[in-house]
Image (cartoon, rainbow, N blue to C red):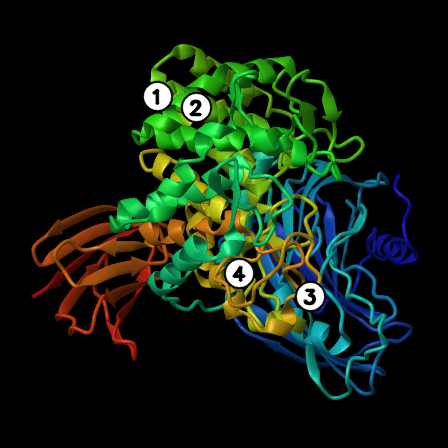
Amino acid sequence: MNALSPWAAAVENLFHGQDLPTLFKQEIKGYKIQVHSLQNSLWIAVTSPIGIQVVLRPAYAPNDHFSLGQITRHDNDISIDLSASIGNYRIKLEFPDKDKPLLRYTTTFKAKNPLLVPFWPRDMVITGPDESNKAPKGTIHINQIGTRSGLQYITLDEPKSGGLLYFQNLTALNDYAQVTETSLGNVVGGNWPELGFALPPTLKDKPIPAYRELILSDAFLAFSPENPKDEMAQARQFLNLLADIYLVLPKPATEYYSWPDMVDKGLHDLEFSHGCWSHGAEQDYLNAYVADYDTPPELMVQLAVLLPLTDYYDWCKADLPAIKKIQNGLDAFYSKELKTVVRFLPTLAKDLSGDEEQLKPNVMDSWYLHHPLLNLGRLAIRGDKQAKKLFLNSLDFTIRVARHFNYEWPVMYNMETLEVVKAETQPGKGGEKDVAGLYALVMLHAWQLTKENKYLLEAKKAAKTLLGKSFDLFYQANNTAFGANAMLWLYKETKEQIYLNLAYLCLANVFKNFQLWDCSYGYAKDYPTFFAMFPLNDAPYTAAYEEQEVFAALHNFLLYAEDENIIPSVSLLIPEFLKYILHRAPYYYPPNLPKEMLSDEVKTGQVDHKLWIAIEDIHDGWEQSGTVGQEVYGAGVAFGIIPRHFYKVPGEDFMIYLDYPTADYKHRKGSLSFKVKGDERLYCRMLVVKKDRSALPAFTVKGKNGELEARYRKDGHIEYCINGNQQIKLNWK
């Protein structure tokens, strides 16, 4: 039995076998909900069909008692007013969907005097059933880490009572964090059976001000009676419960940002800023970070920019000198001795500082071999002969490494000897677990290119090693997202359910690392954060490069999924991430940020506030950003966005922009039709974008439910609000 705090022990005693006075009762899909005002707390007890109780504490008055005030009932909610010596509370309990066991409670508080909070107990304890003297058992699969989403995914294992997703809407707590100068990182957590949210303590002696109304909690709970039998079922349940909550979660509005204007600025700075380039071995190479002249050129950096540049070239057909400049240096990364491409330019590898493990000659970070190969393979499939040669000539070495490590890659190894340099990310945590998915995608590109079955077999072998990694599969965001693509591709080729399940497992690992709340305290008042992606499991910041890569990977996932019956939660969540990255990504660029939020101390190179090159890192609102550097290899953000979200109408002086993914464009003179992906219960923005000063023609736009209303904007564009999952047709004269 787990040790209990006094607060958890009191809950177990209070709610075990007691007939308690009830303020309110409700039943939804077999789940019984009762509200009690007892002693110094208001309680919401949710009893599952099997009898386990999830006891929630939306209001707490330390060393005090509540006086009950007005109770207001409506069809789908109840509001309860309470007063105590420290202040007045209002708790609103809502049932957002009558067809699902889903509830929301919001606690609003007004202090009578300035109030410090040295400690606050967690708001969820799991106990029962009444007829059993055994303590219930469960598994916490996902906890909030840092400033990621304030959620916990839990399965109720003994007695088997399904699963639940606890989600604290941290956006609602921004005012509390601002006035108390507290962070909302790591506020959802705890140990079984005492879980959920705890109000962050006011450690800086910044009190809750008197007579100011603040939200202290805005919690959502979604339940499922299904008992997931394995990690695959858990992944699907997590995604489905997350989608259920997402549908009813308050979400920030988005804005249209003129990406075509910004891409021109970024392209100019990439090509002409001296800080972006180094000269070595008689060739120009991109730096990893602006003004980082100490680190030799890296192949990953060159290709991470080249591929989105190629996407952009295919869209604009304009001369892009940076493409040729990068291509001119690629062959020099091939080692004839090792018969593979390598990370650092071989002729300059002797200049590595050795300050860190990876900054030594012949030391390979496992994912750094496969990521360039993936991009070379994608270029090769497009017909790039140089990329094809480098790709095919490196495959034997790559396969030899995979087999040597039995498809379980360490963090780092020596390329000459294959000796492990660093085995685990942290003691007991294993190596780079998601590299198997990235490797599988490389092998599938090799199979597509050569039609040789041995590469398909390699992909299958690697895929099977993802089994058993559960919610710990994620090492780096882009690798895991690429792994999801590989698994879906394997499913399309084989129709073996295990690969589709592994695709969902990869996606669940990706979605647990999002920030589904909008931080607006401290420096974050100047930039949006909703649906931001963290690059590593424990990274304290979101990063432009990994976000751009996940953006591209999830676009590809939806392309692979077009003819497949994937679960609705995935079709709902992915387009929403894509929509919000278009809203957020401009704020990785220093000219869009206030100078005071950027750190003067930079780990690598320098940050030029006027340069249209993305900073690597956006931190919690109380911390300055740009501490890692200004990442040249993240310059592909804009180049990747424009071809996927701006459709150039042949022969016309306008473009069509949507912030949801689209497909099946069909153009005839005076008309255009296409499919909008996503979920019909959510919506996206469509713009008819002027390309010059010419007046736009008159448009008729029709969707599933008839003609859509236009909004004429001050910038001359025409805007429409469009629900997902429908066919759109435009006509103009």
Residue at x 70%, y 65% (from the top left corner): 623
Q: How many marks?
A: 4
- In the rendered structure, which disc, 4 or 2, sits on the residue that comes first in sequence? 2
Evaluate if marks 3 and 4 touch, with contact meaning CB atoms under 8 Å apart. no
Give the alpha-carbon distance from disc 4 to disc 2, as whole Å: 32 Å
- In the rendered structure, which disc, 2 or 1, sits on the residue that comes first in sequence? 2
Which residue was labeled with disc 4?
588
Q: Position of residue 438 (x, y in %)?
A: 52, 29
SS assignment at label 4: helix
- In the rendered structure, which disc, 4 or 1, sits on the residue that comes first in sequence? 1
Evaluate if marks 2 and 1 touch, with contact meaning CB atoms under 8 Å apart. yes
Residue 92 in view? no
Q: Position of residue 481 (x, y in %)?
A: 51, 38
Q: Quadrant of residue 415?
A: top right
Left/right of residue 588 with respect to residue 687 in the rendered view: right
Mark 3: which amino acid?
Answer: Asp
Mark 1: which amino acid?
Answer: Leu
Which residue was labeled with disc 1?
449
Which residue was labeled with disc 2?
391
Which residue was labeled with disc 3?
600
